[in-house]
Amino acid sequence: MARIPTLTRDQVPERFQAAFDHETAGTGGVVESGPGSVMINSPEMRLRANHLVGYFREVTDLPLKLQELAMILTARHMDCQYIWHAHSARARQQGVSNELVDALRDKKPLPAMPADEAALVAYATELFNDHRVSAPTFKTALEQFGTRWLTELATMMGYYTLLAYNANSFEIDLPEGGPEPVLPI
């Protein structure tokens, strides 16, 4: 069970009600699940954060396979059940191998992978483990993705880290069932 109750419009200060209304327009006036159910407690902040989500969903030409891989790398490094639940099956659907997804989930040695995936995995691993990226790893990633895509990948991992902090600290509930096993933590 989540640590906080679902926010309703009558609990929102008047100056933030327009943002709340905008952010809940598609969900019947409430947000009951996912990291958004936490972020809606600050409606204006969520509204602003969702501009970035809109960019990733509607504007970027960053391949979906790389986006989903960045999301599950973040989920695994942050031990975030919710993001793993939401994106591991999608990563498989976008072309990330079953072997790689399973190895990430189970913290097993990683299989051979295409150059783009290997560059992203190395970049993310150093960034999450060391909080920086070595010159050789950065050079490989930059050559593989170019400046714009590498910037977008780093930003996406940062954004999903933000979501993971909300999901983990507020202990949001996972939806029932799902196509993937939970992360062993």
Image (cartoon, rainbow, N blue to C red):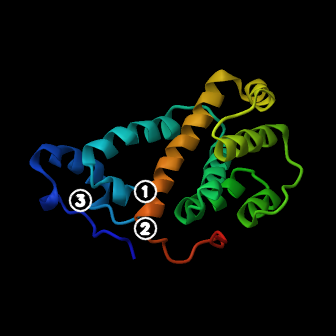
Using residue 159 as the reference point, say whether residue 20 is left or right of it: left
Q: Residue at x 56, y 65 (%)?
A: 81
Q: Residue furthest left?
A: 14
Residues at marks 3 and 1 touching, judged by CB atoms closer than 8 Å: no
- Residue 151, position as x, y percentages in the image: 60, 28
Residue at 43% over, 67% down = 172
Task: Identify the residue under disc 2.
Answer: 172
Looking at the rendered structure, the kind of residue marked 3 is Gly
Element type where label 2 sits in the image: loop
Instruction: Please tell me which of labels 3 and 1 falls first in the chain.
Output: 3
Amino acid type, callout 2:
Ile
**On screen, residue 82 above or below 60:** below
Other-residue count near label 1 (Cα within 10 Å), few / some / many at <14 / 14–19 / ≥20:
some
Q: Residue 161 appears at what percent x and percent y?
A: 53, 48
* Disc on res. 29: 3
Q: Amino acid at mark 1?
A: Asn
Q: Is residue 127 left or right of residue 178?
A: right
Residue denoted by label 1: 166
How crowded pointer 3 is (Cα within 10 Å; few <14, some 14-19, many 20+) is rated as some
- Mark 2 to mark 1: distance in Å? 8 Å
- Residue 70: x %, y % from top left: 64, 46
Q: Secondary structure at mark 1?
A: helix
- Asked which quadrant contains residue 130, the reply is top right
* The furthest residue to the right: 112
How far is mark 3 from mark 2, CA to CA?
19 Å
Give the number of the mark in front: 3 or 1. Answer: 1
Q: Quadrant where the C terminus lies?
A: bottom right
Q: CA distance from mark 3 to mark 1?
A: 21 Å
Residue 167 vs 125, above or below: the answer is: below
- CB-based contact (under 8 Å), mark 2 and mark 1: yes
